[in-house]
Image (spheres, rainbow, N blue to C red):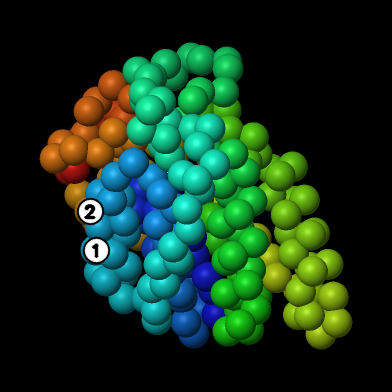
Amino acid sequence: MKAVVLLSGGLDSAVALYLAKSKGFDEVHAISFDYGQRHETELNHAKAIAEKAGVAAHKIVTLNLGDFGGSSLTDKNIEVEDGDVNRTDIPVTYVPARNMVFLSIAASYAESIEAQDIFIGVSQVDYSGYVDCRQEFIDAMEAAINKGTVMGAESGKPIKINAPFVNKTKAEEIQLGMELGVDFGLTWSCYRGGEKPCGTCDSCLLRAKAFAEAGFEDPAL
């Protein structure tokens, strides 16, 4: 039994990694993406999290979604706007089809090592409205993966996309992470990078709200 976990270096993916580790898999593999994002801070945190968690392997895949632009996370000519936890529109931090790309590559990795489980820490509760964090997208991607892999289409070994937090709040994630022993001091959420979190982008605001609701101090601050 093997699992592949998408590890960004953020709060959600760190808890997803530790949750996968708690499920009794023989091997848990982490995969991160250097996709042309505006800073490397989150990747450095992903490396630290993977090392502390003791994963079987940690792959960092290099892409360049910055070639396409269309997001303030991949185009430095587009400013990262201040956040709004009550927004109803899709912010400019949305990276076009990012999770679709990431899950496709994770599926390729999973099939190469015969892993039948992929974990991704998306939520459609406390989030910025991204369309690739919703349950209907996860279901559609799982169906596509099992039509487009030998494991799923021919060998009777379907690959499951586990999105355990899709209907959970970030506060609930934090509470679970505390139980699992996640070192939240190693996680990074800020879109802007820098030595310290900016405290004003969408991701920082959602993180602060979650720690307050969970009743814990954020050790990364």
Mark carried by residue 86: none
Give the residue number, with chain letter if any, for mark 2.
Answer: 186
Q: Secondary structure at mark 1?
A: helix
What residue type is disc 1 on? Ala
Residue 16, placed above or below residue 88: below
Depth order, front residue of 47/169: 47
What residue type is disc 2 on? Leu
Q: Quadrant of residue 34?
A: bottom left
Q: Quadrant of the N terminus?
A: bottom right
- Res. 174 visible in picture: yes
Depth order, front residue of 198/115: 198
Q: Quadrant of the C terminus?
A: top left
Q: Within 10 angstroms of label 2, few (less than 14), some, or many (20 or more) residues? A: many
* Residue appearing at x 61%, y 58% in the figure: 103
* Residue appearing at x 45%, y 66% in the figure: 61
Residue 144, placed above or below residue 116: above
> Label 1 to label 2, Cα distance in Å?
7 Å
Depth order, front residue of 126/107: 107
Q: Secondary structure at mark 2?
A: helix
In the image, residue 160 lies at what x, y percent? 68, 65
Give the residue number, with chain letter if any, for mark 1.
Answer: 48
Depth order, front residue of 175/162: 162
Q: Quadrant of residue 141?
A: bottom right
In the image, residue 9 lies at what x, y percent? 34, 53
